[in-house]
C-alpha cells in the first residue's frame, strides 16, 4: 500500500474557551418516505435525539444515530438518553472547553456509548465553528466543495421492485448503488441488478449476516465486479474477515467492526478489509472520525462516509466530513427527499444530476433549522443547565 502525506490545517478550537450554559436533548419523530429493510430488520419511523448546546449566545446542533433497538450496534435510544443525562452532560456543563478534542478527552474515561458521545461532539463542533465564522468543512480541513454520493437501497418484496428502485436512483444521478443483502437475498438479486445496471458502481452490504462457512457462496459475488462487499461477518470480528478477504477478489469494506482509529489501523494491518466507511456516530465523534480518516490515508486506503438515515442535522455533519480529501468514494449521503417528506432544515439537501451534493459554506453546519417543523415533531425534551 502506498502512503500519502497528511494535509491539513484543522481548527477544532472555538474562538475562545467555551463554558456551556445549557445542553438540551430533544427527541423528534420522523417517518421515512419508504421503509428501509436490512438483514437485521426494517425501519419506517425514527425517533431521533438531537443535541443543542448554547454558550455565549452561540448555539450548536448535533444528532444521535442510535436506534430503538440494539440491532446495528449495542446502543439504543434509551442507553443514549441515560448516559447523556447521568454521565456525559454533567461532565461537560460549566467546564471550560477549548476544542472538540477537549470534549472527547473529557468523555474518554467513559467506555463505549460512542453514538451518544458523537451527538455532543457534533453539537460542539457546530458551535465552535460558528464562533469562528467558519464552516465545519473549513474547520476540519475539507478540500471539496461538492461530494460524490450514492444511495443505499433496502431489501424489497421482489427483485423487480428493487431493480425499479435502482434505475430510478441511477436516473437521478447517484454515482453508486448499494444493495442490502442477506442469505436468501443475494446472488440472484445482484445478478438481476447487474443486468439492469451493467457499468455503474455497485456494492453490497450484509450488515453482519454471514459467517466464514459462507465463504464459497460469497466468492460467487466476485463475478459481478462489485466495488465492495460491506461488513459480511460479525460486528466484533476482524480475524475471520481477514480470512474471507484472502479468499475474495472483491474488496471488503468494514463498517460495524471499526470503532476507532486504532481499530482501523489493526484492520488494515491484518488485511481484514481494503476499505473503511466512516460514520461519525459509530466512532464517537469528529475527533475519532478524523483519526480514522488519517490512518486510512496513511495506509493508502480510501474511505467513504456512511449513513444512518439521518435527518438534515446529521446529514450536514456527514457532508462536511465527506469534504475531507481521502473521502474519495461516493458516500451514503442521499438527498433529504430520499428519506423524509419534510426535513428539519430550511433548505433540504439535493443531489445534482452529476451525483454530487454541495458542501454548505455558511458558519458551522451551514444549515438552518426549521424550528416550526421541529416543534411540531418533537416528542420529548430535556434541558440541562450549568450549576
Ligand atoms: O443513511 O442512507 C442512509 C442509510 C445507509 O445503508 C445505510 N446504513 O450499515 O451502512 C449501513 C446502514 C446502517 C443503517 S440501517 C438502519
Ligand atoms: Mg453498512
Image: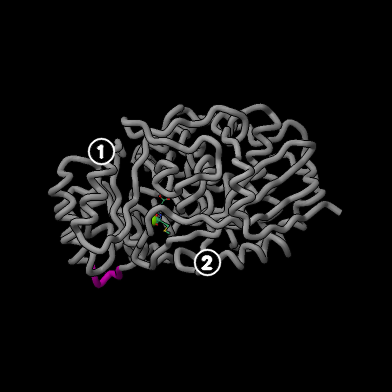
Residue 119 versus residue 218 in the image, above or below: above
Residue at 64% x, 50% y is 375
Residue 254 in the image, given as x and y percentages of width and height: 38, 55
What secondary structure predominates along the stretch shown in magenta?
Answer: helix
Residue 118 versus residue 124 in the image, above or below: below
Residue 91 shown in magenta: no
For the question of whether residue 35 can be seen, the reply is yes
For the question of whether residue 291 can be seen, the reply is no
Q: Quadrant of ligand 1?
A: bottom left
Q: Between residues 269 and 341, which one lies in front from this camera angle? A: 341
Q: Which mark is residue 129?
A: none
Q: Which residues are magenta?
A: 210-214
Q: Between residues 377 and 240, which one lies in front from this camera angle? A: 377
Q: Quadrant of residue 352?
A: top left
Residue at 50% x, 56% y is 259
Viewer-nearest of discs 2 and 1: 1
Measured Cα–Cα span from mark 2 to mark 1: 33 Å
The residue indicated by pointer 1 is 171
Q: Which mark is residue 68?
A: 2
Q: Secondary structure at mark 2?
A: loop
Residue 247 in the image, given as x and y percentages of width and height: 22, 60
Q: Residue furthest bottom?
A: 213
Characterize the local packing of mark 1: few (<14), some (14-19) or many (20 or more) Cα atoms within 10 angstroms: few
Q: Is residue 192 left or right of 387 when viewed as pictured?
A: left
Residue at 37% x, 39% y is 149
Q: Quadrant of residue 184?
A: bottom left
Residue 378 in the image, given as x and y percentages of width and height: 62, 55
Residue 91 versus residue 61 in the image, above or below: below
Q: Is residue 287 left or right of 211 when viewed as pictured?
A: right
Quadrant of the rendering where the C terminus is positioned: bottom right
Q: Between residues 243 and 250, which one lies in front from this camera angle? A: 250
Q: Is residue 95 left or right of 87 when viewed as pictured?
A: right
Amino acid at each position: 500500500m502506498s502512503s500519502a502525506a497528511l494535509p491539513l490545517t484543522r481548527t477544532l478550537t472555538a474562538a475562545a474557551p467555551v463554558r456551556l450554559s445549557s445542553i438540551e436533548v430533544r427527541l423528534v419523530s420522523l417517518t421515512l418516505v419508504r421503509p428501509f429493510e436490512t438483514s437485521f430488520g426494517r425501519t419506517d419511523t425514527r425517533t431521533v435525539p438531537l443535541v443543542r448546546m448554547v454558550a455565549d449566545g452561540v448555539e450548536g446542533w448535533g444528532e444521535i444515530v442510535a436506534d430503538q433497538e440494539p440491532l446495528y450496534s449495542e446502543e439504543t435510544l434509551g442507553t443514549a438518553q441515560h448516559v447523556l443525562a447521568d454521565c456525559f452532560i454533567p461532565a461537560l456543563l460549566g467546564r471550560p472547553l477549548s476544542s472538540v478534542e477537549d470534549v472527547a478527552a473529557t468523555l474518554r474515561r467513559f467506555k463505549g456509548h460512542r453514538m451518544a458521545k458523537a451527538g455532543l461532539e457534533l453539537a460542539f463542533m457546530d458551535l465552535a465553528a460558528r464562533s469562528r465564522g467558519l464552516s465545519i468543512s473549513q474547520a476540519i480541513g475539507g478540500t471539496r466543495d461538492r461530494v460524490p454520493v450514492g444511495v443505499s437501497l433496502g431489501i424489497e418484496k421482489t427483485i423487480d421492485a428493487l431493480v425499479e428502485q435502482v434505475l430510478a436512483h441511477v436516473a437521478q444521478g447517484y454515482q453508486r448503488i448499494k444493495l442490502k443483502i442477506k442469505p436468501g437475498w443475494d446472488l440472484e438479486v445482484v445478478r438481476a441488478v447487474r443486468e439492469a445496471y451493467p457499468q455503474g458502481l455497485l456494492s453490497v452490504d450484509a450488515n453482519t449476516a454471514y459467517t466464514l462457512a459462507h465463504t464459497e457462496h460469497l466468492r460467487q459475488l466476485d463475478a459481478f465486479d462489485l466495488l465492495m462487499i460491506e461488513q459480511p461477518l460479525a460486528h466484533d470480528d476482524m480475524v475471520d474477515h481477514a480470512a474471507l478477504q484472502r479468499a475474495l477478489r472483491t474488496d471488503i469494506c468494514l463498517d460495524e467492526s471499526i470503532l476507532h482509529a486504532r481499530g482501523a489501523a489493526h484492520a488494515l494491518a491484518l488485511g481484514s478489509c481494503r476499505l473503511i466507511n466512516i460514520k461519525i456516530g459509530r466512532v464517537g465523534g469528529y475527533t475519532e472520525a478524523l483519526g480514522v480518516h488519517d490512518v486510512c490515508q496513511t495506509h493508502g486506503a480510501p474511505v467513504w462516509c456512511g449513513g444512518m438515515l439521518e435527518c438534515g442535522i446529521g446529514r450536514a455533519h456527514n457532508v462536511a466530513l465527506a469534504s475531507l480529501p481521502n473521502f474519495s468514494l461516493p458516500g451514503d449521503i442521499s438527498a433529504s427527499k430520499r428519506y423524509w417528506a419534510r426535513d428539519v432544515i430550511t433548505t433540504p439537501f439535493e443531489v445534482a444530476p452529476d451525483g454530487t451534493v454541495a458542501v454548505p459554506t455558511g458558519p458551522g453546519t451551514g444549515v438552518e433549522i426549521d424550528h416550526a417543523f421541529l416543534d411540531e415533531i418533537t416528542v420529548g425534551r430535556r434541558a440541562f443547565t450549568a450549576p
